[in-house]
Every structure is written in structure tokens, then in C-alpha cells.
Image: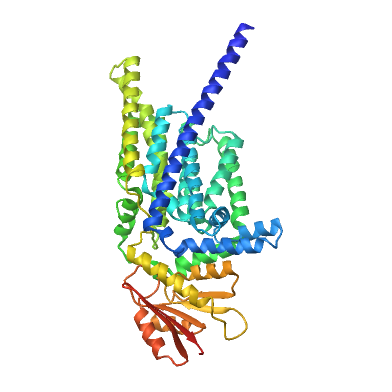
Amino acid sequence: MTGQVVGAESKAGTDQNAWLRLSALVVLAACVTIIVASRSIEVSRLHSRLSVPPLYDDISYFLDAARWMNAARDQSIFASLWDLLRQHAPFSTLVAIIGLGLFPGSFIGPYLVHAVVVFAFLLGIIWLVWRRPVLEIAACLLVVPCVPVVWHTVTEARPDLPSGLAIGLAAGAIVHRGVLARSARALAALGVACALAVSIKPTSFPAALALIGGAFAIRLLVDCIEAGGLRNSIGSAPSALLWFVLPLIATTAALIGPALVETITYILNVFVGQRDLWTTGESFWVGFLRFSIGWDGQFGLHYWFAVGVALMLLRIVLAAIHGTAALLDAVVLLAAVLIAYTIPSVAEIKTYYFGAMFYGLFIVGMVLNGCASLELIPALLARYGLGADTRRHVLTAGRVLAFALVVQLFVRDVVTGQISTATPLSAQQQESIRVATERLWSLLRDIKPAEPGPLIVAFSSPYPVTSATIQLYAEQARINLVVRNELFHRTAQATGDALLKSEILVLSSSIPHTLVGPRAGDELIARMDAEKGLCPLETQTFPDVTLRVYRRGC
């Protein structure tokens, strides 16, 4: 009886300690998230998206959210949910809906809501390394937000970076320990979680599934080898595979299926039909190194790429000394990271955002390799004859020093340092975008169409006015206006012909840019000035661009 009481008290004490440990780590993750979010919003207001009207890709999700919110007032819950799943990226539309609902009349909401993604990522890190000492986990929570791509997740309201972080966590959850030893329930839950990560950015689901599937296949193969070979695993391996794959496919189909045709059409249109407009023409090796030591890799990972590579090499060396099982675990993670790197690197079309799945898994890999190395060091110290007490003191001192270094880096790079943004804007660009957008919208909202129906407005460039911004303003004001983007034509002649099919034409002069479409603004303006039946309504001149507005049939 006494033993039972003591055992119960011991278990209660252990549970209490676990809850205190978890609570402390969650509070730390929340505090880190608040700091990252506040600094990111601050720099965005000064130098990036929040300093101007919504622009580029972000505005498309705000527009989808505004349309959904307007339609939802007259629809059933089921119809609204179906419409949400048919969006281009339901996750980003939902984030915009929540953000615009929480902060009506402002566009800060969708960015702030992305702080929840950062918080969820930190909670995922806690779960992955839960068995490690609390000081190590705390150090991981402070290291992760030092990587610039985490800041950019808050300063950009698009699905790419949240998807990259989520897929990185999903792949890390697959490879960090064996799958054969997991229960059917755990494998099914893992499959559902991976599907949720894949569905954040539907247009990248083939690449995401390739990474997830490749990581699981490698992990399962290594588990079978460690179990004595494929023959000895013939009963358990197929079962584990099915328990993971079936929930993965079913959940992915449920989330992506309603808009599958539109999603595949978009993928084919961008990667096949418009491939020549988006490719940079760089050589293979420059493109292949772009997300590591190239500009994109340096921008998103900074010096942490070198740190992550060093930790991977350290783990492999320590694992080789420790034994085959530890070495295989290190190789499985390395293989998953290489898959995540290769997929965007070999694609002909590249942008900073396409490397998101690599950035996410690289951060997770850096954390797992660091913790695994600290776990393997005691065995190495034992080889040199150090006693248990000495080893314990050495490891404790090492953890304290590492934590102190991480705190210093967090304060320097995040709390007081200069936060970077994925869309930096100069003071001149901010002025051009703000003034041009306000004046154009003031002009368009008072124009009545010549014929019954919507006013049709065509744009030749997304700068200095993003066409979707005008469409969003019209949606919010309940004005019947249709915007046409004539940006994807190969020649100035084709662009001009397309522009002339609309009633209002908005043209920008030629500027050096990396935006889609030919740099033919001056040629188009000269053509429209000479075109009969066009009346110039307004000309806005800025130091970096001239915006001219015409009306057809005046």
C-alpha cells in the first residue's frame, strides 16, 4: 500500500514537472513570437508593404477575402465553406478573412495573423525536441527566429513561406525517428498533418508531396534495414505505409480537390505556357546554387546556412563514431534536406519564395542536428575516459555557454537589429505607389461606363499601381469595376492590341524592373498618344515612372 502511494505521488510529481516545463516553453515561444511580430510589422511600416497600399501577390488574397466576405452574407455555411475551398490558396484567403475581420479598415490584420504561423512553428520545434533538456529547447526557440525567413513570414501575406515552414516541420516529424515503431494512430495523425502542410499552398502540392513521400520512403527503408532487412519487415512495412499514405491522400484530396482543375491549370500555365516570361536565363550552376550560397539563400538564411551545414557535418562525424544506427538517422535527415533543396533548384523558374520548402526543412534540420550532436557527445567523452560527473559538468557548461551565445544573437539580430523584409521599398517607390494609387482610384470611382455594365480597366504594368488594389477598393465600395492585366504578352504590339479592348487604359513608362512582361512602356504610351479615339485623362509624373490614363471612345 505504501509503495502504491509513493508511486502515485511520484507520477503526480512527474506530471506536474512536465506541465511546468511545457508551460514555461510555451510562454517563451509566445514571447519570442510577439517580439518577431512587432519588429516585423514595425519594419514593414517603414520600408515594406505596410508603408504603401497593398501590392503584388498579397493583394490577390485580400481581394479573394473581400469577395468571400461579401458573398458569405447571403450564403449558407456549407456554401461559404465550399467557396473557400475553391480559392486559389484557401489558407491565405482564410488568414486574410480573419485579419480583415479583426482589423476592419486596415490591412495590418493579415500580416499580424501570420504571427500565429511563427508561434505554431515554434510549438512544433518544442514537440520535435521535447526529450532534450529544457535549456537546449529554449536555445532552439531563440535560434529559429534569428533566421531571416522567419521574419519574412510575417511581413508577407502569401502562402509560400508558411507552407515552407509547415512542410519543413512535417518532413522533420517523419525523419527524426523511426516510423515502424509508431502506432497506427500516430502514423495516421502524421499523414493528416502532412496533408494540412501540403494544402497551405495548393499550387506547389506536387513538389510538396514529392518531398513528403521521398522522406517517408527513405525513413521506412532505413527502418527496414535496421530491423534486419526487407524480408523481416514484410509484415509491418506495408501496414505502416498504408496507415500514413491513405490519410495523407484523403485529406489532401478533401482540401485541394474542390479546386484541383483550376490548380493544375494554373501550374501548367505558369510552368509551361508562361515559362519564358518567368525564367531568368541564368546558368545551371548559378541556378542550382541559388537557394544555398546564392543571393536567395543568403537573403533567407544569412550566415545560418553555414551554421546548419557545420552542424550536419558534426552530427555525421559523431554518429559515425557512435554506431551504424546513429549514422543512418543522420543520413536520413541529410537525404530529406537534399530532396528539399533539389526540387526548387532544378526547376527552370525560380524565385526567392520557391525555395521556401528548403528553408523550412533546413531550419528544422539545423535544430535536430544540434540536439542530436549534444546527445552523442557524452559517448565521445566516455571514449576518452572521462567520468560520469565530469561528463555531466562539461555538458552543463556547454549548454549554458551555448544558451548565452544564442541569447546574445537573438538580442542583436531580432530585438535590436535591422530586420530585413522580402519586399523592400525605397522612399521614392513608397511615394510613387501611394500617390499614384490614391489619385487613380479617386479618378476611376467617379467614371461612369459608356455602356451598361461594369467599367473595364486595363493595366500594362503592376507598378506604380497594382491593378488588384483598384479591384479591391472597388469590391469594398461595391462599385461594378473589372480589371484586366495585360502583362503577359510577349511583344509591345500584342500588349497594345489587348489594352485597346478595354474602356480605360492605365499605362506605365518603361522602367528597369524584374516584373513580368516586356519593358515597352514608352513605346505603348507613344502608340496610345497617336491612337484615334483615345482621350488622355490624366498624367502622373514621378522621378522613377510616368503613369498615363486614357479613355477609349471619348
User: Is residue 330 in view from this perspective?
Assistant: no
Q: Is residue 347 left or right of residue 255?
A: left
**Residue at far top of view:** 2
Quadrant for the N terminus, please.
Answer: top right
Whole-percent x, y for residue 355 in the image: 40, 54
Whole-percent x, y for residue 465 in the image: 43, 71
Query: In the depicted view, which residue is nearer to us: 385 or 528?
Result: 528
Q: Residue at x 49, y 74 (%)?
A: 442
User: Is residue 512 in view from this perspective?
Assistant: yes
Whole-percent x, y for residue 436 in the image: 42, 72
Query: In the depicted view, which residue is nearer to us: 71 or 165?
Result: 71
**Residue at far bottom of view:** 532
Q: Residue at x 35, y 49 (%)?
A: 419
Count of numbered tags? 0
Q: Is residue 172 above or below residue 428?
A: above
Q: Is residue 351 above or below residue 465?
A: above
> How is the structure coloured here?
rainbow
Query: In the depicted view, which residue is nearer to us: 234 or 534?
Result: 534
Q: Residue at x 44, y 55 (%)?
A: 156
Q: Residue at x 53, y 61 (%)?
A: 62
Q: Is residue 191 above or below residue 424?
A: above
Q: Quadrant of residue 278?
A: bottom left
**Residue at far left of view:** 384
